[in-house]
Image: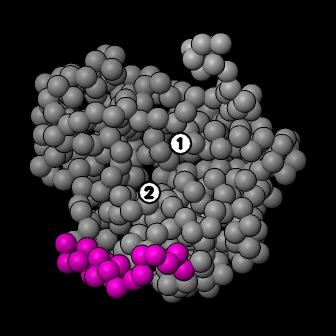
Amino acid sequence: MTVADDAVKTRARAVVAAMTAYTLELREAAIKLNQNESPFDFPIELKDQVLAEARARHWNIYPDFEAIALRGAIARANGLSPDNVLVGNGSNEMLASTISTFIGPGTPVIFPRPTFALYEKLATVAGGVPIPVEFDPATGTLPVADILRIIPAVENAVVIVCSPNNPTGGSLGSGQLQTLLDSGAMVLFDRAYGEFAETPSPYEPSAAPMQLHPRLVTFSTFSKAWGLAALRVGWLASTAENCREIRKVKLPYSLNIISEAAAVVALERRDVRDANVQRIVAERARLIAAMAAIPRVSTFPSQANFITFRVEKKAREVFEALHERGILIRDVSSYPRLAYCLRVSVGSPAQNDRFLQALREVV
């Protein structure tokens, strides 16, 4: 058997072999607006504080098994008990652990589509039965009424909802998360972009104190609003009972001492986050208004730190033309219902000006 013959054989499960990997097109660009990152770096004085704390630690010793310092800091900031909080290597790890806990072979998993592709992949790997609910992303809302019609027709449904939704920017309306919980379904609520939304729910950290529900797990991240994407810190909140079950699945020691220290320091300086969020939200409004004035460009309503927009030519042509001008955004035209669409992260004022000028030239 040749190497080539051997390469096509795999012992991977059929469900995995049939999937495509979640990937990102790697390109260099002077202005990077493709991954919904904050345009504002963590302040240098806070970096120095984090590194000083890390230097004082023994690097030959594993991190605290329970991440007591960070879980306690998150709990205090949100009116919770540490027993209501789990932390890990980004909110994606938290999602994977929770899906493995509550979704098994045959579990119906309902989610809007288009949305973050990882939900369907993780649910499929766990053996769940994906039930996508198609919706028009241009409305700026999520298809809660359609989801509610499906829930009674299946048993032990799990609903996964991202609000604000990636990659479309729309969000749940006031009281809609409560309506989903009242349906009897288990709800996994991803609020990675929640700090940028104008209408948070009582189940979000901004509620202070944050409410809990026995059929709700809420996921948050330090990557977006907090500007700590490079350090990969995520957390979830739920009842102590749910956290106890998820902890059985979650990998141990998944958060290193530098990332934990940075998140603790960030929580002590929420004023930095709040100021950056205000600047990003203001730039979001300016970008949407400016893009609306460009012929052959239509934007979707957004409550996130990005804007999805449709053009009247092939999205790939616009993507490539912008990249030639030193600007990297995200081509999302392969998503369901997003033909001719692209997504741009809200950058700094200077970055946004460059993007707008380039977009005017391209379209």
Amino acid type, mark 1: Phe
- For the residues marked 1 and 2, what is the alpha-carbon distance in whole angstroms? 12 Å
Q: Looking at this view, is 97 or 360 the one in front?
A: 97
Q: Is residue 113 above or below residue 314?
A: below
Residue 62 visible in rendering: yes
Q: Residue 217 in the image: x percent, y percent?
A: 66, 64
Disc 1: which residue: 116
Q: Is residue 68 left or right of residue 25?
A: right
The x, y position of residue 138, in whole percent, is: 45, 35
Q: Secondary structure at mark 2?
A: loop
Residue 12 in the image: above or below residue 97: above
Of callouts 1 and 2, which one flags the residue occurring earlier in the amino acid sequence? 1
Would residue 270 be seen by someone viewing this image from the given angle? no
Depth check, front residue: 16 or 353: 16
Answer with the quarter of the image where residue 84 lies: bottom right
Instruction: Give the structural element (helix, strand or loop) at label 1.
Output: loop
Residue that mark 2 sits on = 193
